[in-house]
Amino acid sequence: MKILKTLFFLSIITLYLTAKDNININLTQEEKAFLKAHPVLKINNSLNYPPFNYNQNGIAKGFSVDYMNLLAKKLGIKIKYITGPTWNQFIKMLKEDKLDAIINIVKTKQRAKEIDFSLIYHTEANTIYVRKGDETVDSLEDLNNKTLILIKSSFVQESIKKYYPNIKQILVDNILEAITKLSKGEGDAIIGKKNVFDYIISKNEISNIIPTNYVDDNRMVSLIRIGVNKKNSLLKEIIKKAQRSVSDSEMLDLKKKWFGTKEHEPITIKNFLTKDEINYISKRKVFRVCTRKDIRPIEFKENGLYKGIVIDILNQISDFTDMRFDFVETNSWDEAKLFLKRGRCDFISTVANGNEVIDFANTTKIFLNYKLAIITQKNKPVVSSLKDILNKKIAIEENSDFIPLLKAINPGIKILKTKSHRKSLEAVSLGEAYFALEALPIASYYISKYSMKNLYISRYTGMSYSINMAINKNNEKLLHILNKSLSMIPKSQYREILNKWTTVSFETIFDFTYFWEIAIILILLSSIFAYRHYLLNKLNKELTFANEEIEKKTIELAKQKLLFETLYNKAADGVILISEGKFYSCNEAMLKILKYKKEELLNKTITDISPRNQPSGELSAQEAKDYLKRTLKKGVTNFEWILTNKDMENIWVEIVFTAIEIENRKVIHAVIRDITKRKLLEQELEDLNINLEKRIKKEIKKNEINTQQLIQQSRLAQMGEMISMIAHQWRQPLSAISATTNNLILKMIIDEKVDKEYFDKELKLITDYSQYLSSTIDDFRNFFKSDKEKIVFELKDIIEKSLSMIKTSLDARSIIVIKNIDSKCKLFTYPGELQQVILNILKNAEDALTERRVSNRKISISTQQENGDFIIINISDNGGGIKESILDKIFDPYFSTKNKRDGTGLGLYMSKIIINEHCEGNLKVKNGEEGAVFSIELPILKEEENSDVT
């Protein structure tokens, strides 16, 4: 037997030495026959999908094309590239078997129904593009209820439809059509691979489209594969085998050629966390972690220190996020749940059953996952399945989540509940239980540490021991940070941590009682082939893992590249890098400011693009030299400067010099902002301020004159009406005087002698009528006087005078006036102008009642105080009101509801100016129950103010 084992291991070593450097494509006879029957494969070649798959001068080019050519070379076949159809048409051709494969496709659930996919050979993040001016749109959340322009049936289009239903879509056939539509403003954004979009935008000279950010959603990262028809599974397997034969160096050469792949910097907090998440960590600094002290080697406490696999993982997270963890000791799973629920810790580091915390916590992704092993004594028979030993006694930790599951499978199972994993294994070792169920790291640790050499793994079960972390539902930000951090730890690091804590090599014994002799023969015959195949699979897995790492590095590098391009090339301000006094790099904004081409501007100095002297009178050359020296000494300098563009025009700029170091050489980073417009505006503002006060006084004076002229014009317009009123007012007194005189004459003729008492009585009547006429003339003469200054007067007197002036006219038209006037109210304003407004409103009411032939005609005039500060004069009538359609126009100049010969349209306009501007009040109108209601609001003269004025 020893000789047999020696031969076996010698054969394995020989195989290893010969197989490691000879990775060939092992095709089956059926696969070889397929390639013989199909020596030329028809593959898609897009017109515009650089750098992956495009056509230049009739030749297929790109990363995907070169990758497919490499596979074809290894398989000994040729490729015929089909150019012309759209993406949607290529998909249709593949489904109809008119195409053998699509070489740059992403797997989706919908596509997988009709298409088979190869291994992933490249990973690419997608980028958001918008029109200039919309740079604030830099996430999918910003595009809610907005419109994306997408390629029909593309991976991005299907993903947006599935995961972001609130984003509207415009579907097009190709990328150029999408970019053109966005350029014309037909949508809000487009999404795609940055290398592809940048090439097409540049080639077609589209200048108003810019990238803003990568799509921050792992579901929308493009995992690029080769797709074949579902019916052609043989070709899929051939392609997969060819993919596995591609070496790391071959893949790296392709990526360097098309993407310039380089090793990127180590993981830091800025690589994968958002600004908001970084600020959150900076503010919190310390996070409380509920830990168990007895789950070896997962997590435990020893000599006052926390150790184990999970603790090492948390230390990794702490290293590249600056998070600090304060461990909160818990004695049981129930206590840990209680602490998290009550906020005594921020998260639980080890959770084996997330369903128990689902009501109050969220769990991270599973970051540790181990198969459960059946552990028995070495002298027990090999277990074929778990069901075969469920009639035996099991030793298991009393809080284990697997107890209910085992009871569900076999209600009568004998369970020995223990206090810990160690006690469970000791029970099996001492024969107190037949078997135990443990995860490999736990079993390995305790058996090694406590020398339980009589135990072994009899068989692995289909069950798993999975671990994640639990975070309170109110702290989604911490959940996202932990998930991202766990994802950033390389698989190699996870393996290193696991190996640290599971150093024991577990012996697994198989029972070969019935077929030992046959097995020996089979081992001798098949060991060479089996182990060789094993080595190939192992190497392929290592290659796949290496490719994944390369893809991660590529994505991170692309993100950093985009950030730099956005900050540098797309900045609104000009940016120049100066080395040894000369420009050696600049951005687009700088070229626009100076109107130079890039090749014209480079290698110039700041003196070359400046006038001989600056506004200070100093020479530009000397002053620039001083600023550069000062920057190199102090680090930062800012100043205003005049530059000269290519057209020899002077431009005012604001410059910030910053000293930086690039590739071990000192460089001046200059940010230059064009402030010419600001300087012109400052000069204009200065000139304006000089003349503004004079202009304001002039305009005010001019306005006052115009207003006074309009008031006078309005008064003159009312003169005709006033003369008519005078005629009405005088008609009765004149008739009375005439009748009295006639009576005296007749009396004298008849009686020859008139009684003195009778004569005195008649003369008194004539005198009274004459005084009334004189008073009326005074009232009208005062009305037409222009008020020069404000005076104190009683409101009641002005209203009564106004009414007396049109009383005869109102009586003649059978209009009743209803008065309710505050007799004590005094005002300090212009009485003549106020009287003009009241008369104008009364006259308009009279005309409305007359024109509409209203029966029971009446005008109401009343006053009321408001808050003791204002008096409101309400003048209303029962004439039916003003049409709603013109109600807001009646105060407009030259607007009248009367005939042109009866109205000028100035009355109410001037009334508004008088009350609102001259009298510092407010004139407004509304429709009441019976007719129009005009309200004049004026400030009341209070007692203390009255004494000051008088």
Image: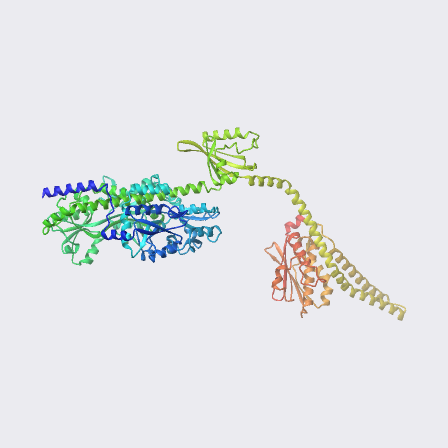
Judge from the rendering whether residue 700 lies leftward or rightward of residue 521; answer left or right: right
Judge from the rendering whether residue 653 lies leftward or rightward of residue 545; answer left or right: right
Judge from the rendering whether residue 434 lies leftward or rightward of residue 224; answer left or right: left
Residue 897 at x, y = what percent? 67, 63
Q: Eyeballing the image, is 292 above or below 807?
A: above
Q: Quadrant of the N terminus?
A: top left
Task: Give me the residue at 51% from left, 33% from top.
Answer: 606
Q: Quadrant of residue 321?
A: top left
Question: For this rendering, which residue is in front, 212 or 421?
Answer: 212
Q: Residue furthest right?
A: 752
Q: Quadrant of residue 449?
A: top left
Q: How many marks?
A: 0
Residue 714 at x, y = what percent? 71, 56
Task: Give me the residue at 86% from left, 67% from top.
Answer: 744
Tell me how the rendering is colored. Answer: rainbow
Question: For this rendering, which residue is in front, 398 or 689?
Answer: 689
Does the rendering let one see residue 293? Answer: no
Residue 766 at x, y = what percent? 82, 63
Question: For this rendering, which residue is in front, 201 or 869?
Answer: 201
